[in-house]
Amino acid sequence: MADKKIISCAITGATHTPTMSPYLPVTPDAIIEQAIAAAEAGAAILHLHARDPETQRPTADLGIWFHILRSIRARTNAVLNMTTGGSTYMTIEERLRAPLAASPELCSCNMGSMNFGTYMMKDKYKGKWLNDWEEDYLEASRGAIFRNTFADIEHIMTELGAGGTRFEFECYDVGHLYNLAHMVDRGFVKLPMFIQIIIGTLGGIGPGPENLNFMKETADRLFGKEFKWSVLAGGRHQMNMGTMAATMGGNVRVGLEDSLYAGRGRMATSNAEQVTMIRGVLEGLTMEIASPDEARAMLGLKGADKVKF
């Protein structure tokens, strides 16, 4: 089982806006349906953000979150991984409102504050916006900082960890790995852990085999064998970097949060399409795909019967 590959699927995120793709799920019901289809296609973990059904913006609304969580859980056994990142423009109180109430099996945790640039995306859609908030939302990232201070990280780990929630530690640069090592040394992190190496985000480490190797080698030096890992690569790098990670012993993440495409110049019509694509690649390389319960065992999760939704 240890050699099986965990496929995570990030359903909607907070980066892409409705204008960018007609296939991006931007309402709660669309998020629910696409999440279930992604699980049926082979995703063991569903990484979730919530969006408001009227504005289609990222939201921290508790009622919307619980509608999404309960609806998905009723129809699939997949691990539900809630964001604690929310969006760059939410306070930490807003970002943690739903995870603290829901006490999920797994939450993401960004391992540092950082510039998180999405403003460059707006030039492609100038004058063609479906919603009047989208252009300003992207432009605001030019002067914004995604905040996760050491105090914030301690708070996330302490409060959510008290309920048995475990973490997908999102590391956007090599310094984030050292931040994580600091938290391990101080006893905030239970080993073994799950690291998501993220490459290709403006503000973090760039894409490419050399950078992926450097991040993995740094994690090896810091943590030895005490971690499972996966790769999230943005845009056109999604599939090739995920495949490289799998051949190096890691796991993979796909989803419309990270890339809107399913090939050169061809938009993905769903999250399930991307899951099907990467599953085909992995199985073509004679790799086996982990089921949700196998992923739970591999990551030491508390089980779906111990959540609060």
Image (cartoon, grey):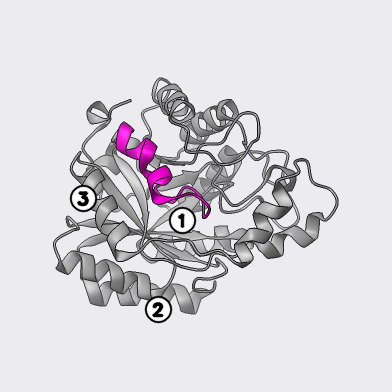
Which residue range is magenta in the image? 83-101
The label number, if any, that marks residue 214 in the structure image: 2
The label number, if any, that marks residue 211 in the structure image: none
Query: Which mark is first along the chain, 3 or 1?
Result: 3
Element type at marker 3? helix
Q: Report whether 295 appears left or right of 212.
A: left
For label 3, count other residues whose C-alpha is less than 10 Å away and answer few (under 14), some (14-19) or many (20+): some
Q: Residue at x 40, y 20 (%)?
A: 74
Give the quadrant of residue 252: bottom left
Percent position of residue 106, x then y:
31, 43
Element type at marker 2? helix
- Amino acid type, label 2: Phe
**What residue does disc 3 label?**
158
The label number, if any, that marks residue 285 in the structure image: 1
Q: Residue at x 30, y 58 (%)?
A: 153
Q: Residue at x 47, y 68 (%)?
A: 114
Vertical side of 30 occupied by 253: above or below: below
